[in-house]
Amino acid sequence: MAMNWMPGRKIDHPMANMKKAREMIDALPRGDSVRALEDAASWLDSINREPGFKLDYRMELLDLIDSGAKAHWHAVAPEYLDAPRLQKLYENRLWGAFFAYWRLLGEAYASCLKQYQAGDTVSGIEKELPRIAGRVLRSLTVQIKWRLLRYETVEDRIWEGMGSTYLFAESRGFARKQAAIYPGKHGESSAQEELLKALLLVVSSPDALTPVNLQIAERVAAHLAKLGTVEATHTAGNGFYFDLAMHVAPARVHKGLRAGNTMRFFGPGAGRKALTDIAQAINQKGAVPEDLNLGGNFGKQSVLRVLSHMSRYWAETPPERRSRRLDLVTRITVVPGFNEAVAWIASSATSDSLEFVVPVSSESWVVSNASDGGYGATVPTRKGDWLRVGALLGLRAEGQSVSRAGIVRRTSRDKDGQRRVGIQVLSKAAAPVRFAMAGGEKAAVPAGDASNALLLNSKPDANGHVELALSAGSYVAGKPAHMFVRGKGIVISPVSMVEEGEDFDMATFKIVKPL
């Protein structure tokens, strides 16, 4: 088909020629899907920055990249989901490549809608609008899922995109119209169905699900979204709401809620009963129904647990929330060893970013039973593993800026060779300090300002005592020491040894006086 897409100026872009664009997409590395997604994201970013492409050509380019990258994101997703224990730097790369690709793809399709609204129209574009809007909404849902996989807050821009795209679909009269969003068996959908796939997942308390169970929940929500309802007024069965203009997450309807013109009330509709029907079918036949596409093979007990979980949160009467939930699931960064943990906590204490550098030895774990007191995790065993009872760790939950210190208190193996680990968190926060044996009351800050110890109290207790984690052999009973916090010296007196580890001492000291 002839394209008249270069009026006025020549576009200086590598993909301005469709033949060359196809060659570039064909050249995506076949044996390295992470690199392929990074390359595809780079092309999407460059296309998004080029204002000269006519709408029909831009859409053709995006479809080319979308199709060419499909096999690669299909390869990366299971690798991330199936690994509860990843080397942190690699986990960052996996997650980052996948998320960046879908963010830029969504922005690219959204730019097509903006270009159309700005007056750039071509023959037949009206028929393409449901497909484009559907792809925008689907890309945003993928981004929501991947934020949830890291147990991070969904960004406001994602909710803004959801709301504005659905408002556009309503204004053009195709919000409930079925269209081929993508080719294939599961490609038929509508803007309303795509919106509900995201909303029903988010109101299912996904923060209490492991990544694998979240995958199941996302696919169940997608499967049943066609049975859900979205209305402009609150009716029985629509117990949740989403404001298309407020850029915030959906929530359950509550007493005193004031409805505005952009507020939409939604619910699972017949999906409530369908959850029960699926569970009954699994129990009767001993297998997951063939028409339920979960994106992988999962044990029936895992699927039944997720269905039960979703049923509780989709119910018209919500479950009572305990004052303190102890069964949260999250992803944490684990830095093994005293010296590396101290250096990492010190670097994070001086950084204003949540993306500060982590050591090469750091790992990313999925944990459950998270509480102020510690974490429980099930992780694969590795050859030459450092993981053992008594190991000191640096810890930080994904999306948080506070780093903590912990100690491995128990490990055991199950029949599949997985190791169950219990970690005691030593404090709400760990402050890096400099520790030195006293050399006189007028001793200055020791040479070098690098922290070599961790202060495990935010303030002294009623007896004026604090706890410190020190390098092994640093504690000497009966001999005073100096602690330097942000350049200020304090004389401290040893009280007792709390615990001796392989590479650390944990001891109690009494605050005596400032230096």
Image (cartoon, rainbow, N blue to C red):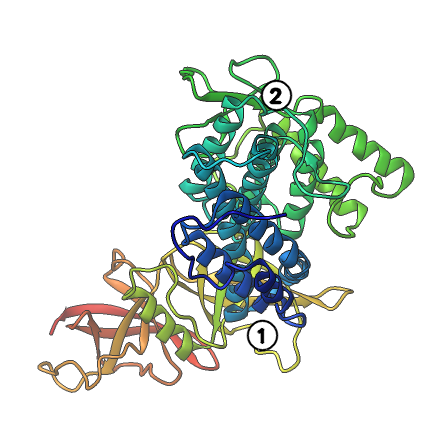
Do the residues under discs 2 and 1 have CB atoms within 8 angstroms? no
Local crowd at mark 2 within 10 Å, few (<14), some, or many (≥20)? some
Residue 97 position within the rendered picture, expressed as x and y whole percent measured from the top left = 53, 61
The secondary element bearing badge 2 is classed as loop
Select label 2 or label 1 by which is in front.
2
Question: Number of numbered discs present?
Answer: 2
- At horizontal 26% and vertical 72% (from top left) the residue drawn is 433
Q: Which residue is mark 1?
A: 388
Judge by depth and name the residue closer to the eye, 401 or 268: 268
Residue lying farthest to the left in this orientation = 442
Mark 2 vs 1, N-terminal side: 2
Q: Which residue is mark 2?
A: 316
Residue 243 position within the rendered picture, expressed as x and y whole percent measured from the top left = 45, 26
- At horizontal 60% and vertical 35% (from top left) the residue drawn is 128
Q: From this viewpoint, is residue 497 visible?
A: no
Residue type highlighted by circle 1: Arg
Local crowd at mark 1 within 10 Å, few (<14), some, or many (≥20)? some
Judge by depth and name the residue closer to the eye, 190 or 340: 190
- At horizontal 46% and vertical 50% (from top left) the residue drawn is 53
Residue type highlighted by circle 2: Glu
The secondary element bearing badge 1 is classed as loop
